[in-house]
Amino acid sequence: MKVFSKIADLQNELFEARKNKKTVGLVPTMGALHAGHASLVKRSVSDNDVTVVSVFVNPTQFNDKTDLNTYPRTLDEDCKLLESVGADFVFAPSVEEVYPSPDTRSFEFPPVTTVMEGAHRPGHFNGVCQVVSRLFYIVRPDKAYFGEKDWQQIAVIKALVKYLGLKLYIVECPIVREEDGLAKSSRNTLLAS
Ligand code: PAF
């Protein structure tokens, strides 16, 4: 498994893979990985020749600074888990690498971006679309994998793919739960026991 922080280095590897007609799966994450993420990666590994996992806490999707600052960051542990489930490339860029200048694009796909989480977290889905579209342009995957825990996010990303006219299949993966039934989530470590 190789870990990259620079777009150009990742793209050089992907160029080689594509020259050899290999298919590419992308699993976008914000790190602090758990069994739910592992299931997405396993699915991508079984579907594709090459699996790229991005680990990037995207500032533009946080409308609450405290949430951004306290979001767990565990890249070393994440890499161990990713290696154990067969990921090929980890892309863990800096904020400046992903956004060399502020992203001023605005994505609105009503009603899906304006109801439920869209209503409660203004700007959240716009930030998700900004980063996911950047990742799609950087990696150019054949398939991208998202968990059904974030069902509304999947609907937004499908609208984004249609809007951008990308040749890309969005694979929806089932929720993985804790023993007590709670959906696994990176933020669960922040819950009081
Ligand atoms: O679901 C997440 O972890 C994030 O919203 C995503 C899709 C990786 C974009 O930052």
Image (cartoon, rainbow, N blue to C red):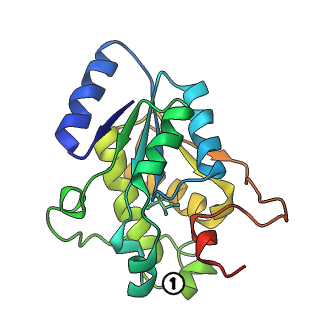
Q: Position of residue 59 (x, y in %)?
A: 34, 72
Q: From what the image shows, is residue 147 above or below residue 12?
A: below
Q: Amino acid at mark 1?
A: Arg
Task: From the top left corner, tell me how far across and down residue 113 is, in percent.
Answer: 53, 74
Q: Is residue 93 left or right of residue 90?
A: left
Total tally of numbered discs in the picture: 1
Q: Quadrant of the C terminus?
A: bottom right
Residue 188 in the image, given as x and y percentages of width and height: 64, 70
Q: Residue, x 39% and y 64% (percent of image)?
A: 57
Q: Quadrant of residue 23?
A: top left
Nearest to the observer: residue 75 or residue 114: 75
Residue at 41% over, 18% down: 22
Q: Which residue is mark 1?
A: 121
Q: Residue at x 44, y 58 (%)?
A: 74
Q: Which residue is farthest left?
A: 101
The quadrant holding residue 65 is: bottom left
